[in-house]
């Protein structure tokens, strides 16, 4: 594009007040319109093009698919484009890729798009719930999978989960009772191990199996866990000691009281008990539990453990 020529032409058209100035001829008008159109990027049009390309590409073209996902992410930074994306069936395609793809990189990128579009966007959240209930089932299944992977004595995966902002992400996705149940159980488990998260192994007492860790060689007269103890306190892991409480304090964990304690149904008492157990590890307004205890007194069926915790 010759911008200098366009500038000179524009100046010539406005130079003075020549009474002989003529209306722009048809050829010049078309040329100017085409020049301006070529410099305008239509995000909605590009989204449709990307979705079409994603549907046609074979799964083994991983690099091309990931590149298209990256282009989508750039476009979807704006709130209004996320709205348009769900209207043109973009979320359905993301869900399809996240569920049916055999490539983990593709699944992860698809889930990132779904998360990005739904985050803090009530329009997309409502649309997803009304038009694509499978998203809810997918989220619940992901919570179940995460719970099974994280809970227990494997401290390494807990640290990786924390590094990837896992705590913040699960607490931003509490749309169903099952999600709330799985999320609080993950939080309770992380708090249980919080003081030991800087260690390589959670328990190296004499008869502990250290989560199935086995030594290649071991003397009958030597406790294997004594050998493992030498690598138990790595300097790079010290930052993880107490990190769960620190993160939950930063995001004001007690604010989730309304989310967890507004429902007094007996069938959900275990979830509420887990939340209260976690809540009591932080500074919070005591009236929260006093009010909850009063509300429970009107319930048809009460879990005595929950009453005692309040």
Image: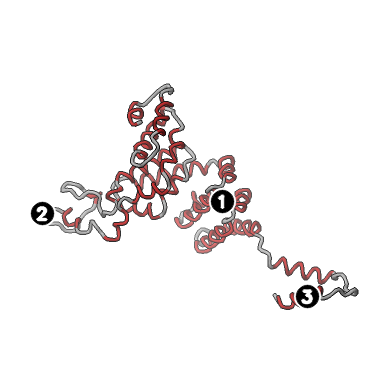
Q: Quadrant of residue 181?
A: top left
Q: Residue at x 88, y 72 (%)?
A: 22
Q: Earlier in the sequence, mark 2 or mark 3?
A: 3
Look at the picture and state if 154 lies above or below 24.
above
Q: Residue at x 43, y 46 (%)?
A: 170
- Residue depth check, mark 2 versus mark 3: number of the one nearer the observer: 3
**Residue 169 point in image, percent of width and height:** 45, 48
Residue denoted by label 2: 220
**Residue 98 point in image, percent of width and height:** 49, 51
Residue denoted by label 1: 93
**Residue 45 point in image, percent of width and height:** 66, 58
Q: Is residue 199 left or right of residue 49?
A: left
Residue denoted by label 3: 11
Look at the picture and state if 135 lies above or below 214.
above
Pick whichever, 219 or 45, lies toward us: 45
Quadrant location of the C terminus in the rendered image = top left
Pick whichever, 1 or 250, lies toward us: 250
Q: Quadrant of residue 42?
A: bottom right
Q: Residues within 10 Å of mark 3 (few under 14, many from 20)?
A: few
Q: Residue at x 59, y 43 (%)?
A: 127
Q: Residues within 10 Å of mark 1 (few under 14, many from 20)?
A: some
Q: At numbered mark 3, what does the secondary structure look like: helix, strand or loop?
A: helix
Look at the picture and state if 124 lies above or below 36.
above
Compute the Cα span from label 3 to label 1. Answer: 49 Å
Q: Is residue 310 left or right of residue 94?
A: left
Compute the Cα span from label 2 to label 1. Answer: 58 Å
Q: Earlier in the sequence, mark 3 or mark 1?
A: 3
Q: Is residue 109 left or right of residue 130?
A: left
Q: At numbered mark 2, what does the secondary structure look like: helix, strand or loop?
A: loop
User: Cβ–Cβ below 8 Å for labels 2 and 1?
Assistant: no
């Amino acid at each position: 594009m010759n911008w200098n020529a366009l500038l000179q032409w524009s100046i010539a058209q406005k130079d003075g007040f020549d009474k002989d100035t003529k209306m722009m001829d048809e050829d010049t008008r078309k040329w100017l319109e085409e020049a301006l159109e070529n410099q305008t990027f239509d995000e909605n049009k590009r989204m449709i093009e990307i979705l079409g390309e994603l549907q046609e590409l074979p799964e083994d073209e991983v690099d091309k698919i990931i590149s298209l996902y990256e282009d989508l992410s750039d476009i979807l930074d704006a709130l209004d484009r996320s709205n348009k994306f769900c209207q043109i069936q973009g979320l359905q395609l993301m869900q399809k890729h996240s569920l049916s793809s055999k490539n983990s990189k593709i699944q992860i990128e698809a889930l990132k798009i779904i998360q990005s579009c739904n985050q803090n966007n009530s329009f997309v959240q409502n649309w997803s719930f009304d038009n694509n209930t499978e998203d809810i089932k997918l989220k619940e299944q992901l919570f179940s999978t995460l719970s099974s992977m994280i809970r227990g004595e494997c401290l390494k995966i807990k640290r990786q989960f924390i590094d990837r902002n896992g705590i913040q992400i699960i607490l931003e996705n509490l749309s169903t009772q099952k999600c709330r149940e799985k999320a609080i159980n993950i939080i309770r488990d992380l708090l249980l191990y919080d003081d030991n998260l800087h260690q390589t192994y959670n328990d190296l007492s004499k008869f502990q199996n250290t989560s199935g860790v086995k030594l290649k060689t071991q003397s009958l007269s030597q406790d294997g866990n004594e050998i493992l103890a030498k690598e138990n306190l790595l300097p790079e892991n010290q930052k993880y000691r107490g990190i769960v409480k620190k993160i939950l304090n930063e995001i004001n964990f007690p604010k989730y009281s309304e989310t967890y304690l507004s429902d007094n149904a007996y069938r959900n008492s275990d979830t509420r008990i887990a939340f209260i157990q976690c809540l009591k590890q932080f500074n919070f307004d005591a009236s929260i539990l006093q009010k909850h205890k009063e509300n429970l007194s009107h319930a048809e069926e009460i879990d005595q453990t929950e009453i005692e915790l309040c």
